Amino acid sequence: MMKESLAKNGLMLGAFAVVTTALIALTFFGTQDKIEQQKQQKLLSVLNEVVPSEFHDNALYANCTEVDAPELGIKKAHKIYRATLNGQPSALVLEATAPDGYSGDIDIVVGVKVEPHIVNGIQKSMQNDSRSGESENLNTSALPLTDMAELDGNSPEMHTPEIKTTNMKVLGVRVIEHKETPGLGDKIELAVSNWITSFSGKSFSPDNLAPWQVKKDGGEFDQFTGATITPRAVVSAVRETLLYAQANQSALFSAPNTCVTTDSVETIDDVNVDETQPHSVEEL
């Protein structure tokens, strides 16, 4: 009798486990596409936040390239959205991943204002040269403003140019996805605090990286009370992203467009995406 009862209860528990697992699997697969769509909509909604409309007159979502760059995170390819104004390069929005958040990866986007090359006082477009049809190759090691000698139009001889370098201006930074601790690390979200806006308007120079750390490490950016790991990870990711943008801005504009143009409009309402966030105590 007892064996029969145990067997019956075991079968019931087994059946319950199978049904529950099946329901969870169906829910996951049934909502996966919708969640991905919401993530994409959330990304598109912040493009105009990190690059305000006065800096571009093109549809940002329809002009991008995709790169595999360690500076932006090694686990996946990242898209680089390209802004133009009156047909000229004006800004970039770079996807990046901070791999060292307290609870995992932190996905961000960084908007930066780009400057054309200035050689001998003459502005040099960062787009393909229409006269030669040549484009610059993507180079992750050389700075974009280290041009070789420019040919003088009035002389057949080559000469060393005077290159005017300019600092890169940060237009905005936003967090797209994270799993940081609610009440501590989630302050990187604009909806929780305005900490992320501390990047906006800052000037970046690869010759002066000291300010691009949290204050605890000698930099300019606040850490959170009881939580230093998360802001440190974000500041580090933004710094590496800016270094990459500074070194490759010309080549990024020259790269082929990998974005698929659709009939969807650029302005998309903000979408709230529910994210599972662990309730753990973040270490200092």
Image (cartoon, rainbow, N blue to C red):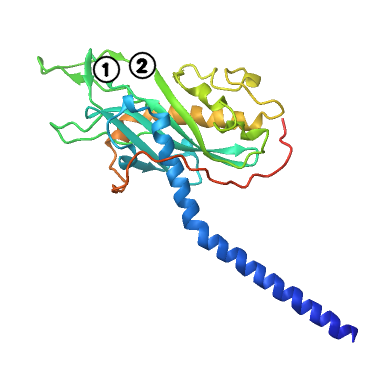
Q: Are marks 1 and 2 in contact (CB under 8 Å)?
A: yes
Give x and y (percent) for residue 114: 34, 24
Q: Nearer the viewer, residue 177 or 143?
A: 177
The three-letter amino acid code for the residue at tag 2 is: Thr
Q: CA distance from mark 1 to mark 2?
A: 9 Å
Give x and y (percent) for residue 87: 22, 29
Q: Nearer the viewer, residue 87 or 229?
A: 87
- Say which quarter of the image contains residue 51: top left
Q: Nearer the viewer, residue 11 or 128?
A: 11
Residue 77 appears in view: no
User: Tag 1's secondary structure?
Assistant: strand
Tell me if mark 1 has few (under 14), some (14-19) or many (20+) residues whose alpha carbon lies within 10 angstroms of its own: some
Dot 1 or dot 2: first in sequence order is 1
Height in image: 180 above or below 218?
A: below
Question: Mark 1 — residue?
Answer: 118
- Residue drawn at (53%, 45%), measured in percent from left and top? 273
- Tag shown at residue 166: 2
Tell me if mark 2 has few (under 14), some (14-19) or many (20+) residues whose alpha carbon lies within 10 angstroms of its own: some
